[in-house]
Amino acid sequence: MIDFYFHPSPNPMKVALLLAELEAPFTLVPVDIFKGDQHAPAFRKINPNGKVPAIVEDGVTLFDSHAILLYLADQHGKFVPTAGAARAATLSWLMFVGTGLSPFSGQAVHFLHYAPEVIPYARQRYLGEVERHYQVMDRQLASSPYLAGAAYTIADIALWGWASAAPYIFGEAGLAPFPHVARLVAEISARPAALRARQLREGLGLKTEVDAETRRALFGRLGGSPAQG
């Protein structure tokens, strides 16, 4: 059985979607990052970096959303090719999302919504990079049903996590400037597994207010990115 350390934010939602797709049994362990649960000593033993998501299965601990996606997909033999060009493409796009779209999206959210002061350069820098990453993926998806080719993989699952929250970055326009990405995200969102993943957000009773306690928990004394990885 998997213990799934979860907060309903973009990176944990990637893992939630994969677990739902795999129909893998798990115990949900909510982590209230707005209250600072991620800094508790017990959780730091699971993820020294103090971020969600994380999983523990039969004494094996994993943290970082993309490490978890790859581990689970390989373990179950689903949603990731085993060799050759298809695996290479999947890993390339998985890491593109992991090292590009995800962190730039997190920083864009921070400077657009949480920074204590408006810093135009930071907003333009991170928003511009988020837009550029979506442009790259939109070009890829113009000629391919999925990021890595003909098959739905963990690269697409990784994209869905942040792309589902695109309106929080782009406003009402959302993914409209990126129609091929929007098409894929809509397709994934309509899958039964995506519905089950979204249902995990219900009834958790987690804090939503962004007050001084929340800011300390998420950003620390000097600020930073939301506590998710």
Image (cartoon, grey):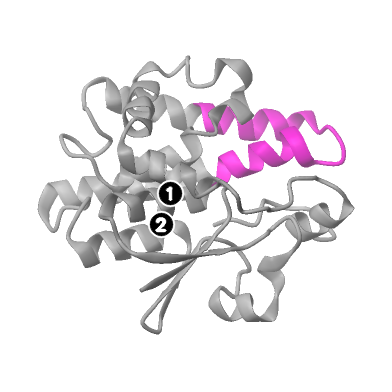
The image's mark for residue 14 is 1
Q: Quadrant of residue 143?
A: top left
Residue sitting at x 79%, y 53%: 223
Left or right of residue 187: residue 216? right
Locate residue 80, reporting x and y percent. Answer: 21, 53
Residue toward you, 132 or 65: 65
Residue 75 percent location from the top left of the image: 23, 67
Q: Is residue 119 magenta?
A: yes
Q: Which residues are magenta?
A: 103-131
Q: Amino acid at mark 1?
A: Lys
Q: Is 43 left or right of 139, judged from the image as shown? A: right
Q: Residues within 10 Å of mark 1 (few under 14, many from 20)?
A: many
Quarter-of-image position of residue 112 = top right
Determine the residue located farthest toward the left in the rendered image.
Answer: 84
| 118 left or right, relative to 19 | right
Majority secondary structure of magenta residues? helix
Image vertical order of residue 168 relative to residue 105, above or below: above
Type of amino acid at the residue the image marks with label 2: His
The tag earlier along the polypeptide, 1 or 2, is 1
Q: Is residue 35 magenta?
A: no
Give the percent coordinates (x, y) of residue 208: 74, 46
How many angstroms separate mark 1 from mark 2 (CA)? 8 Å
Query: Circle 2 is placed at which residue position?
Result: 66
Look at the numbered discs 1 and 2 and tell me whether their residues touch, using CB distance below 8 Å: yes
Q: Nearer the viewer, residue 96 or 57?
A: 57
User: Which element is circle 1 on?
Assistant: helix
* Residue 34 x %, y %: 73, 55
